[in-house]
Image: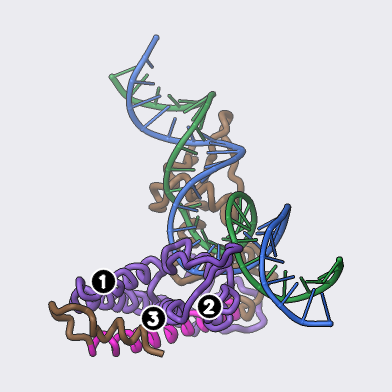
Chain colours: A purple, B brown, C green, D blue
Amino acid sequence: MGYLRIGELARLTDTNNETLRFYESRGLLEEPRRSDSGYRLYTQAEVLRVHFILRAKRMGFSLKEIDELLSLRVDKELNTCGTVKELAEHKLLEIDMKIKELNRMKDALQQITDACCGGEESAIHCTILNALDAE
Amino acid sequence: MGYLRIGELARLTDTNNETLRFYESRGLLEEPRRSDSGYRLYTQAEVLRVHFILRAKRMGFSLKEIDELLSLRVDKELNTCGTVKELAEHKLLEIDMKIKELNRMKDALQQITDACCGGEESAIHCTILNALDAE
DNA sequence: CTGTACCTTATAGTAAGCTTTAGGGTTTAT
DNA sequence: ATAAACCCTAAAGCTTACTATAAGGTACAG
């Protein structure tokens, strides 16, 4: 009683059965107890855990990093805020680098795109193609 | 005489043999002529073409999109500046969306990270873990 | 008791962009 | 002549995060 089968957990977390089994295979979800017939039986704890995973994903953590966060969480008393904050700050740096890189791309592409007439004439002198050709 | 073997083209473009053969398999490089023994023989044109590919990659175009750009370039007179500019603007929109998404991630993560003491005490009350746990 | 919805496993496929491996031939320098 | 450096192909492997397929067993409603 009170147990959730995989489909119910999937519905409650807006995921699906395959994804949950995949998370289990990657260690993000622990092997749950099973019914006599082998069905996975989850509790409310797993609902929270899946939400944790999804939230961390939205923060840009990879599944591997989420696995690390989860391990930290399991032994909260053994780990320090410093350890957790380090992970988060490292991720922040990564996100920042990606943003900077995308901004560089954007500026470069914007520049050559702005210079392009975009008209109906043939692309022989198209500034975009020429910019990509330039030495 | 004057022909480049694949290793030389790789050196000149700061790529490697495997990548060049891979580009060929994806249609980004045309099948070059071969020596009697079957070695690929390239000309200076291929150096420029590889540079075009690498430059477009740095602009954030995927190999598939680069293939499109190259086809446009082949028949420059048949294509219009408008076609090229459309591709570029579509890519600009995509880049913009990615930047916005990363900024959202960054703000959210920054907020919970700033709230974390980062100290040596146990992570039981760590604001980062708790934020990821929160409903 | 039968249909439908649900669950199980193992295996393969997807996307992108390569890299690696295995098992061979060729070119060049000494 | 032989070793080192170079080239060839086909096929598999890598990474991330799933998704799909096949071939089955289970739960429950009517």
The amino acid on which the numbered mark 3 sits, given as a three-letter code, is Met
Callout 3 and callout 1 share a chain: yes
For label 2, the SS is loop
The amino acid on which the numbered mark 2 sits, given as a three-letter code, is Tyr
Instruction: Indicate the position of residue B94 as horizontal and vertical percent values.
Output: 52, 80
* Tag 2 residue: A3
Question: Does the magenta run of residues contain A55?
Answer: no
For label 1, the SS is loop
Instruction: Indicate the position of residue A38 as horizontal and vertical percent values.
Output: 58, 62
The disc label shown at residue A59, or none: 3
The disc label shown at residue A75, or none: 1
Question: Does the magenta run of residues contain B106?
Answer: yes
Main SS category, magenta section = helix
Task: Please tell me whether residue B107 is drawn above or below residue B79 in the rendered image.
Answer: below
Instruction: Indicate the position of residue B18 as horizontal and vertical percent values.
Output: 48, 46
Mark closest to the chain's N terminus, 1 or 2: 2
The amino acid on which the numbered mark 1 sits, given as a three-letter code, is Asp
